[in-house]
Amino acid sequence: MSLSPENARQAIPESDASESKDLPKVQIRGVNFFYGSHQVLRNVSMDVPALKVTALIGPSGCGKTTLLRCLNRMHDLYPGNRYEGSIQVQPDGTDILGSGVDPIQVRMRFGMVFQKPNPFPKSIYENVAYGLRLQGMNRRRELDERVEKALREAALWEEVKSRLHQMAHNLSGGQQQRLCIARAVATDPDVVLFDEPTSALDPIATSKIEELIVELKKRVTVMIVTHNLQQAGRISDMTAFMYLGELIEFGETNRMFTNPAKPQTEDYISGRFG
Amino acid sequence: MEVFPRTSSRRLDKAVETFMVWVLRAGGWASVLVTFGIVITLVTESWPFFREVPLIRLFQDTMWTPLFAQPQYGIGALLAGTLVTTGVALLVAIPLGTILAIYLSEFADPKFRDWVKPMLELLSAVPTVVYGYFALLSLTPILQKIFPDLPQFSMLSAGLMMGVMIVPYVTSLGEDAMRSVPMLLREGAFALGDGKLGVGLRVVFPGAFSGLAAAYVLAISRAVGETMIVAIAAGLQPKMTMNPLDSAATVTAFIVQVSLGDLPHGSIGYQSIFAAGAALFLMTLGFNLAGHALRRRFHRAT
Amino acid sequence: MQPEPLRTLQEGRARRRRAIDSNFRRLGFFLTLSTLGILAILMLNLAMNGLARIDWQFMSSFPSRRAGEAGILSAWVGTLLLMLVTASAAIPFGVAAGIYLEEYAPKNRWTAFVEINIANLAGVPSILYGLMALGLFVYQFRFGQSLLSGGLALGCLVLPIVIVATRESLRTIPSGIREAAFALGATRWQAVWHHLLPYSTGGIATGVILAMSRAIGESAPLITIGALTFIAFLPPAPLISHAPFVSVDWLFSPFTALPIQMFNWVSRPGEEFQSNAAAAGLILMVITLSMNAAAILLRRRAQRNITW
């Protein structure tokens, strides 16, 4: 079993992007999720394409965040949670819900950005370097390079390069969220999960984050939970509509928004409920 | 190129995690071990005492003189001292503490409150031997001007001092409870034209009652278990009296008095202080559990 | 338009309420100040009776039959060493228990029992810790009437304070910080060690200071283990001149401590001994009150500095 991203990248040469684009990055098959005896996800199956932005939409309580948090096994942190089904991740095809899989290694492959910016009360530099340090990277030169690269990817480098060692809490809300994105991408994860990343931000900061997400998909697969339909329309390639724990419809965003196949999808998108 | 994550470091992380869970759990156990230590010591060391002294004599005898040649085991004589000093303390602490709690939560300027509350809490940080000193050498002479017959050691003086000591428990916990009563309830009464004190007494006080009751109960527990003030200022002579102007030993003062002397392991004196300790433990356990339950109920309600 | 009688009635009522309120406000303010005044009176009283007694001779002399020659050398050295034992017992176990209960413990009956147990422990009278130490440490473990027995008794006594402070301090850290660490692949211990502990040191330090200030003023448990004896010597030094250069002999030495020395002097007749008591009391008060003040300031600063 090879779970490390570096091994993965050796297995599939980066030049051969067409092949990795053809394979679905994440194959979700028949996933049920239980919180105690309460079933939150019902038989969810979907193929998340590589290097695309996939949006999860639906009314609150529909299970979209729950599904997202299955992907990096965050549910393992709390008692009483149970998964069924399988989630295979390419290129190695590991089933991350499998019993022998270490949830911590899964989390090292899936970056996550949360609803509220949650930088550590440490310096900007240490925030970005933390994930790298956890993976055993300690050499200063290497860390410096990777931190700069991640901050550039998060479009934050120019704003903070002169104050890398100041506290992250002095940044504005939007900058903090971009720092969290830098923190998530610094370790070169296979997939980055966004859980309503702009719900605590003002419109200007929101549009910056949205630009960033579109930019990110050139390099990494993105999944985003959003309660904002316009946002899903603006930035996603694929959209999944969930309702009451079930995946109602999944398809290309343009098609879903113009010509939904299911009546519930149409009702939700046209604002009749939700 | 190094491969990340390094599986070797991951294995080490896992080992550290397992090890630390055990270390931390040991900390949790330590607190339980302390309780077991107290209970087991009290039971085993007082066991011979209760084998020798039939329980009925604890309540039949009117004097507590386990060290005499003709011993008497009327624990009522000690309980009377504890009861009276606690009663006097509560007569000070409950009204004063409650008024201060209402004032601080409903009337006082928030800045003033944030400044005063920690200052008041200093009163419960004063070493109790200092209170004992003050009660014996300053308070008692003042009280003797009011009650000329007051002896040098009196439950009144010790009880009053103890009351001052436990005021912060009542005020602090009580004020927390009152402030967590939702503003909406107050506004309902203010909208009908009630004044601040009216709202405080008719809306906030009942709303916070189980929280306040918890504060009272915990204050009682403090007073029952307080040792140095009573040992210094209330006297060390067990006496079956309910008169606060008299001197009498409490359960705690008796333990101190016996400890001051030479105390061979296994003697009846040694056993008797563990018997007294067991009685004290049961009393305070009852109050502590009741206070804990009341607090839990209050937190669930708000 | 309301009828005239009702309006005058309302005005009267309103005026009365305002009067009641402002009277109560005055009463509350007066009682607050008088209660704080007691603290001031206590300090003044001790200072007036004891300040003159505090000098180098007082600090550097052993207790004596003659009040004028007596001092608190063995008492303050004893208190210092006791606190060393108390802190080394209470801090590691208390912080560990706090972390375990807040971050690790599953929600089950055992945990609920441990929590009730700690709540009760915090209210157990201090003298019962003394009885436990007497039965368990002094006789069962044969530590004798030593610094070790006394320090452990006080350590058990303040354990709940450290546990509660640790838990409260950890609880103020938002769950987003934990999730951020976990999402990057941290183990629970890494999240604790890299993040939660560093971010809660202010709160834990506050709790530790309060715990130590409580322990310094305690005398009942020490009297119970038989520490009220005439101690005119110092425990053996912890550092020695030959290998291995540290010695634990002092742990098993008999001792006295400041509050005990004060109690000893209070219970003696004679004004001279009483001014010795006042002097010892003044020193005790200054130590405990300044520790409490430090704790308050530390808590204020910790609250101001970190805004999540």
Image: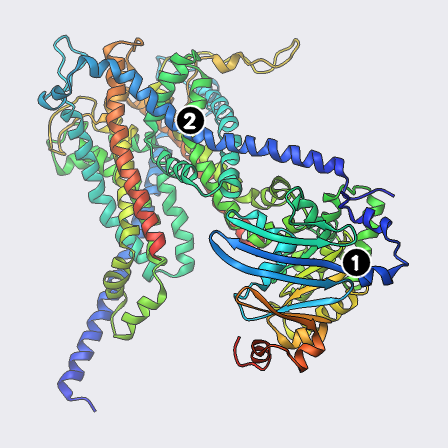
Of the two numbered discs 2 and 1 in the rendering, the one whose residue sits closer to the viewer: 2
> Residue A232 falls in which quadrant of the image?
bottom right
Q: Would residue C145 be seen by someone viewing this image from the given angle?
A: yes
Residue A173's quadrant in the figure?
bottom right
What chain letter is assigned to the residue under label 2? B
Could you say which is closer to the camera, residue B264 or residue A255? A255
Residue furthest right in the image? A15
Checking the image for residue C152, the label placed there is none
Distance between the alpha carbons at the discs numbered 2 and 1? 54 Å
Q: Which residue is mark 1?
A: A162
Could you say which quadrant of the image residue C246 lies in?
Answer: top right
Q: Which residue is mark 2?
A: B33
Q: Residue at x 17, y 29 (%)?
A: B79
The residue at the point 40 percent across, 34 percent down is C285
Percent across and percent down for residue C122 are: 37, 36
Residue at image coords 24%, 20%: B275
Q: How many marks?
A: 2
Most foreground residue, A38 or B9: A38
Q: Is residue C160 above or below residue C266?
A: below
Where residue A102 appears, as percent x and y from the top left, is: 67, 43
The secondary element bearing badge 1 is classed as helix
Q: Amino acid at mark 1?
A: Ser
Up/down of C283 relative to B42, above or below:
below
Specify the color scheme.
Answer: rainbow
Q: Residues within 10 Å of mark 1 (few under 14, many from 20)?
A: few
Q: Are marks 2 and 1 on the same chain?
A: no
Residue at 72 percent across and 58 percent down: it is A26
Q: Quick check: C91 above or below A267?
A: above
Residue C220 visible to the viewer: no
Q: Secondary structure at mark 2?
A: helix
Amino acid carrying mark 2 in the image: Leu
